[in-house]
Image (tube, rainbow, N blue to C red):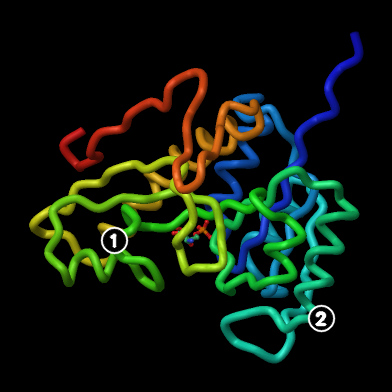
Amino acid sequence: MRDQPPFRLGILGSGQGSNFVALAEACARGSIPAQIALVLSDVPDSGILARARERQLPARYLPPGKFRTKLEPEAELAYAQALREAQVDLVALAGFMRVLKGEFLHAFEGRIINIHPSLLPSFPGLEAWKQALAHGVKVTGCTVHFVNAGVDAGPIIGQQAVSVLEDDTPETLHQRIHAAEHDLYPKCVAALARGEIRVEGRLVRWTAPAFPLSGATSKAQ
Ligand code: GRF
């Protein structure tokens, strides 16, 4: 029997790339049965590109065009083309700071995921940990979800809770959410790569094994 071709991941990021590192390490040790086929960034000197190149993974800066919060249409086509040429099965956003629009969503329909630093649908948008603190919630966390045309609005794949502590600052809370992300994102990508995720409208079902339910993460643990 011939081996299955490896599941290929495309990763888009604009920042330091700590979630990319969590995914790359999980691929390297085999806990995600996939290979990283391409890393793309809209920021030429971003940490994510540097960290990908350190690992000898294909990594490219692609200019985003003139807008600040989205790709211009030609750029969107260039991103889609690069990912198609790299034959990616799944596009994982890891701190990509631009909203993806029609052409791109169409090219990879149902195959784009994102990680967001709150328990969606609470606190979509920017600096979700600051929104959580300002709101006085006692529990927040992170969410991995499919990307659709809304902002942080697609079907939810997995979530991990993080307790908000009395003396939290935006920095301390963000740091614990980041640590939870590094745990959650590889688990979700592994399940997708293994074909253990089924989408039924807005609902995402984990087939086998069941999603490991994660409790609140706090300093005390
Ligand atoms: C993460 O907090 C993620 O939730 C958000 O962007 C941040 C990226 O961080 N979408 P990093 O570049 O992976 O360290």
Query: In the visual, does 42 lie left or right of 83?
Result: left
Q: The C terminus appears in which quarter of the rendering?
A: top left
Residue 82 appears left or right of 19: right
Dot 2: within a 10 Å radius of its alpha carbon, few (fewer than 14), some, or many (20 or more) residues? few
Identified by mark 2, the residue type is Glu
Q: Position of residue 140 (x, y in %)?
A: 25, 53
Q: Quadrant of residue 36?
A: top right
Residue at 76 percent of width and 73 percent of height:
76
Residue at the image point whose x is 26% and y is 57% from the top: 173
Disc 2 on helix, strand or loop? Answer: helix
Up the image or down, 71 lies above or below 16; here it is: below
Report the front residue among 88 and 153: 153
Q: Which residue is mark 2?
A: 74
Q: In the visual, does 171 lie left or right of 208?
A: left
In which quarter of the view is residue 191 placed? Answer: top right
* Lower sequence index among marks 2 and 1: 2
- Residue 64: horizontal and vertical position, in percent? 72, 80
Give the residue at mark 1.
122
Disc 1 packing (10 Å; few <14; some 14–19; many ≥20): few
Q: Is residue 131 above or below residue 209?
A: below
Q: In the current view of this chain or complex, which residue is farthest to the top? A: 1
Q: Quadrant of the N terminus?
A: top right
Residue at horizontal 68 percent and vertical 52 percent from the top: 91
Q: Does dot 1 land on a helix, a strand or a loop?
A: loop
Residue 61 spot, x, y in % from top left: 77, 70
So how many labels did they put on this image?
A: 2
Q: CA distance from mark 2 to mark 1?
A: 33 Å
Give the amino acid type for the residue marked by disc 1 in the picture. Answer: Ser
